[in-house]
Every structure is written in C-alpha cells, then in structure tokens.
Amino acid sequence: MSDTLQRLAAIIESRKPVNGGDPEKSYVARLLTRGDDAILKKIGEEATETVMAAKDARNGGSADKIVSECADLWFHSLVLLAQFGLTPDDVLKELSRREGISGIEEKAARKDTLREAEENPKN
C-alpha cells in the first residue's frame, strides 16, 4: 500500500521548482510556487468536498465519490508534506507510534505536553 504513496511522493518531489519542475507545465510545480497558503487553501477545499461526498453518500449518493475526494485530499496533503520537506513515511511512522494507544489517552498526553511547554517555556 505505501508503495503507491512513495511513488507519488517521488513524483511530487521531482516537480518541485528546485528540482526542475516547471510551473508552466506542472500543476504541482505551480502549486508549490504559489506557496503554503495556496496549498492549504486546496486542502481546505478538498476536505470540504470529502465531507460533502460523505454526507451525500449517507443520503443515498455514491460512496465512490468519497474515495475520489479522499484521493484529492491525500494528494494535496502529500504536496503539503513535500513543501515542508516531509514524506509519507513520516506520517506512517507517526501512525505506527500511535498504534495500540487509546485515542483518548494519546490526546490527553498531547494536552499534557502542551500544558508543560506553556508552563515551562524555553527562553
């Protein structure tokens, strides 16, 4: 399963303008050239479209639309990762780290860590 993500991440990496990607010929290069805000806007749009597809499916619409919109969301998330020098492996490692940990416990631990950081800021 992760082979597909790896291949797609490699293609996205190759489309970065610093790697020769041409914004006139590549959607990814154009999006990366436009910067973080453009990528974040696309992720927001795709997330909204995913939510709407799920709501439509819940009301008798095609569940295939959820898959299509999730693919768009994942794609743009991969572009965001590339923008910050991250890879799908980074996300998979984090998911692996969380495996077997209660979501409630994990969220509480993150809150504790944030609270500690706020109480003990490093100057």
Image (tube, grey):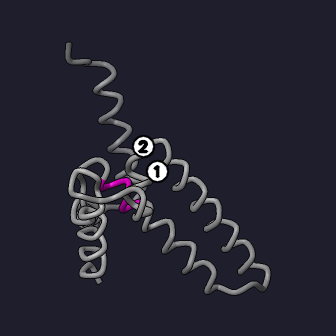
Residue 80 colored in magenta in the image? yes
- Which amino acid is tagged 1? Ile
Q: Quadrant of residue 79?
A: bottom left
Looking at the rendering, the stretch of residues picked out in magenta corresponds to: 77-82
Q: Is residue 22 left or right of residue 70?
A: left
User: What secondary structure is the magenta-colored segment mainly?
Assistant: helix
Which of the 4 image quadrants contains residue 77?
A: bottom left
Q: Quadrant of the N terminus?
A: bottom left
Q: Secondary structure at mark 1?
A: helix
Horizontal and vertical percent for residue 103?
40, 59
Q: Report whether 18 appears left or right of 51.
A: left
> Residue 110: which quarter of the image?
top left
Residue carrying label 2: 36
Residue depicted at x 35% and y 52%: 106
Percent x, y for residue 108? Answer: 39, 45
Image position of 100 with respect to 84: above or below: below
Q: Position of residue 81 (x, y in %)?
A: 32, 55
Crowd around label 1: few <14 · some 14–19 · many ≥20 (10 Å): many
Label placed on residue 39: 1
Indicate the secondary structure of the residue bearing disc 2.
helix
